[in-house]
Image: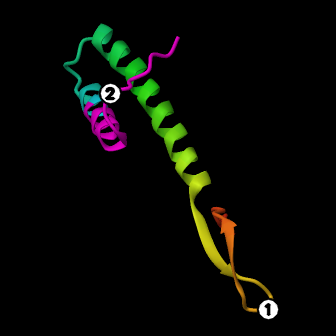
Amino acid sequence: MVKKTNAGGFEEKLAKLEAIVGKLEDESTPIEESLSLFEEGVSISRELSVKLEEVKRKIEVLRKDAEGKLKLEAFEEEEDK
């Protein structure tokens, strides 16, 4: 089961994730603690991903149609070609 980390906003959660990664990179961190940190990091990462998707869906951009008139469209990420 994935536990939710409800405290703090996006930036705080991102900072927490960065701190977890730092501890995981430290070879002196015991394996039991590393496993717990990894699970917490995965949970935070999933929450941040969901939040980013929510924000992405809310973004709208102005684009010109064929007649040169501005119209609102949902934001769509351009794919690399």
Badge 2 density bin: few <14, some 14–19, many ≥20, Cα 10 Å: few
The answer to whether residue 55 is above or below residue 3 is below
Q: Position of residue 28 (x, y in %)?
A: 19, 19
The answer to whether residue 64 is above or below residue 1 is below
Q: Position of residue 49 (x, y in %)?
A: 51, 39
The answer for how far apart the CA atoms under marks 1 and 2 are is: 48 Å
The answer to whether residue 40 is above or below residue 51 is above
Q: Measuring 69% from the left and 68% from the top, which residue is drawn there? A: 73
Q: Quadrant of the C terminus?
A: bottom right
Closer to the N terminus: mark 1 or mark 2? 2
27 or 45, nearer to the observer: 45
Q: Position of residue 42 (x, y in %)?
A: 45, 26
User: Which numbered marker is on residue 19?
Assistant: none
Say which residue label 2 marks: 7
Say which residue label 1 marks: 67
Q: Measuring 33% from the left and 35% from the top, which residue is drawn there? A: 13
- Residue bounds of the magenta highlight: 1-19
| SS for callout 1 | loop
Badge 1 density bin: few <14, some 14–19, many ≥20, Cα 10 Å: few
29 or 74, nearer to the observer: 74
What is the basis of the colouring in this image?
Answer: rainbow
Q: Measuring 32% from the left and 27% from the top, which residue is drawn there? A: 7
Q: Measuring 38% from the left and 21% from the top, which residue is drawn there? A: 40
Report whether 18 appears left or right of 61.
left
Magenta span has 46?
Answer: no
Kind of residue sitting beneath label 1: Glu
